[in-house]
């Protein structure tokens, strides 16, 4: 684990002006424009990134296409790709302290969570796909004796990766690692408010021996660089995690351009369902509080709708309030802080707007609902709980992406299922019960890509993450993620 002394030393590091990473080189943007990087810790700028444009994206895509066609990576042996990616994982671990603090300065995640979720998780993901790729086989079809049918697995070509600001390094690795392991070349568009760790990852990849052009990073505004990547005629696929509206635009860009494949992991409004026979209500309350309030609620799978069975409602609410009030909101680079900063002043304003609307619609504020530590200049918000929430309220229907929990009451299992599924989203969920039959029925009945039982979160790289309905149809993590980045080619050979 990182030490407070190391954190304090690294937070003073001068970052300065960052450049694009294209064709193995750090390059200036074509327009010369830049964007200031403001830390949500104190509201002060501490770096700048290139405000990229369509010409920069085109440079990166051309570099990736050239690298793909020369075969230095795409035609290399799985053993070679494994060696380079394993070296990259080692370098990410070696620089974990630097990457963790850099990311926290950028997006405000509390350092205790960021250290594990960003560099350590990214290193584990890269190593996982490095180890996996030389164990992925093609197939021989069952044919007549005079025919040989072969099914080859080949890389797609150039993959565009667009990631969000909450966990850019972790989520970036979920997409970059399998795409690279499969032999593709990648162009990454990082979030404009959290680009620094992905720029550093590209540098480390070059140091690990990744050939020039195989991994490129172009910073800038989503409406410009993201659109250019989505519309580019020489990009074969886009892997995206983010909001529904942007996901829809990427599908439109695909239709308007070359019908590139688009893999979407979108938002969630995940139900966390507690039955009266939950094994340990106190523990369930602690885990539930962390499941919505860690990283200031800025987690796509956050348990933002709490469904409590009526007979334990009051008792659970007491435990939940106790667990919530023990959480310390503060400087995310202080190891004693349980919750860090909201990612930006704009996101904080959005969160507080949800609070106002929830009160106007009749929900009862139990705790929180206000900005904290305004004197620091940073963006901090108190963990917020509303009860008397109904399904018609905005708080029950729309993703806040902040530390705001809506609590609902249910009587029967059937009512719990109805409430759980009464949303356009279907990303994650949880069920707390000691009854094995209830657990299995709920796993079947809930429309979500992930159903936790007697826990919330913690699923590792071995299982897929993705949703149903308007939570999208991309799947990150596990061996199944490789399917997105490999094409099938049939060879039908007359003997």
Image (tube, rainbow, N blue to C red):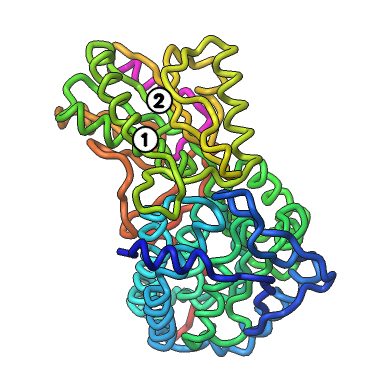
Can you give x and y, in whole percent of width and height, for residue 24 in the image? 62, 84
Residue 440 quadrant? top left
Q: Which mark identifies residue 420?
A: 2
Is the residue 354 above or below the residue 224 in the image? above
Inspect this view and state whether residue 140 appears. Answer: no
Q: Nearer the viewer, residue 18 or 47?
A: 47
Foreground residue among 24 and 240: 24
Marks 2 & 1, CB-CB < 8 Å contact: yes
In this rendering, position of residue 169 left or right of residue 33: left
Q: Is 150 situated above or below 242?
A: below
Residue at x 52%, y 48% (from the top left corner): 265
Q: At numbered mark 1, what does the secondary structure look like: helix, strand or loop?
A: loop
Image check: 385 left or right of 370? left
Q: Which residues are magenta?
A: 412-427
In the rendered view, tell whether residue 1 sits above or below residue 471. below
Q: Split into 4 quadrants, where in the image is the C terminus?
A: bottom left
Mark 2–mark 1 Cα distance, whole angstroms, equals 8 Å
- Which residue is pictured at 45% across the width and 40% down the height? 427
User: Which of 261/464 is in front?
Assistant: 464
Secondary structure found at label 2: helix
Q: Which mark is residue 429?
A: 1
**Residue at 61% across, 61% down:** 190
Q: Is residue 444 magenta?
A: no
At x 35% / y 37%, what residue is drawn? Answer: 327
Percent x, y for residue 222? Answer: 71, 54
Q: Position of residue 38 (x, y in %)?
A: 64, 54
């Amino acid at each position: 684990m990182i030490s407070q002394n190391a954190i304090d030393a690294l937070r003073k590091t001068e970052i300065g002006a960052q450049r694009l990473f294209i064709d193995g080189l750090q390059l200036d943007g074509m327009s010369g424009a830049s964007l200031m990087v403001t830390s949500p810790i104190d509201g002060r700028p501490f770096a700048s990134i290139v405000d990229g444009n369509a010409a920069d994206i085109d440079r990166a895509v051309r570099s990736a296409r050239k690298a793909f066609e020369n075969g230095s990576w795409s035609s290399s042996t799985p053993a070679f790709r494994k060696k380079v990616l394993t070296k990259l994982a080692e370098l990410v671990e070696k620089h974990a302290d630097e990457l963790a603090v850099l990311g926290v300065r950028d997006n405000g995640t509390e350092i205790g969570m960021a250290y594990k979720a960003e560099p350590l998780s990214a290193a584990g993901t890269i190593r996982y796909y490095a180890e996996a790729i030389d164990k992925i086989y093609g197939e021989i079809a069952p044919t007549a004796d005079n025919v040989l049918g072969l099914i080859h697995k080949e890389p797609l070509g150039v993959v565009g990766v667009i990631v969000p600001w909450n966990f850019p390094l972790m989520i970036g690795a979920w997409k970059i690692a399998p795409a690279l392991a499969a032999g593709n070349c990648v162009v990454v568009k990082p979030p404009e408010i959290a680009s620094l760790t992905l720029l550093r990852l590209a540098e480390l990849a070059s140091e690990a021996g990744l050939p020039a052009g195989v991994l490129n990073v172009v910073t800038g505004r989503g409406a410009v660089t993201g659109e250019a990547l989505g519309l580019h005629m020489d990009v074969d696929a886009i892997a995206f995690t983010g909001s529904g509206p942007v996901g829809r635009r990427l599908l439109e860009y695909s239709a308007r351009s070359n019908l590139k494949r688009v893999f979407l992991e979108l938002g969630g409004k995940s139900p966390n369902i507690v039955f009266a026979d939950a094994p340990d209500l106190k523990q369930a309350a602690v885990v539930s509080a962390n499941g919505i309030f860690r990283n200031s609620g800025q987690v796509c799978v956050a348990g933002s709708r709490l469904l409590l069975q009526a007979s334990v409602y009051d008792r659970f609410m007491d435990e939940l309030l106790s667990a919530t009030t023990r959480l310390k909101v503060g400087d995310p680079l202080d190891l004693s802080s349980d919750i860090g900063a909201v990612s930006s002043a704009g996101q904080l304003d959005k969160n507080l707007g949800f609070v106002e609307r929830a009160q106007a619609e009749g929900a009862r504020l139990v705790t929180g609902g206000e900005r904290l530590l305004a004197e620091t200049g940073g963006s901090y918000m108190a963990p917020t709980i509303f009860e008397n929430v109904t399904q018609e309220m905005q708080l029950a229907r729309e993703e806040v992406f902040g530390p705001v929990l809506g609590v609902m009451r249910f009587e029967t299992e059937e009512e719990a299922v109805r409430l759980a599924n009464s949303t356009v989203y279907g990303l994650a969920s949880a069920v707390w019960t000691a009854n094995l039959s209830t657990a299995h029925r709920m796993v079947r009945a809930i429309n979500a890509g992930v159903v936790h039982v007697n826990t919330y979160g913690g699923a590792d790289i071995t299982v897929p993450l993705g949703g149903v309905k308007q939570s999208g149809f991309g799947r990150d993590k596990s061996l199944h993620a490789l399917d997105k980045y490999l094409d099938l080619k049939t060879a039908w050979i007359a003997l």
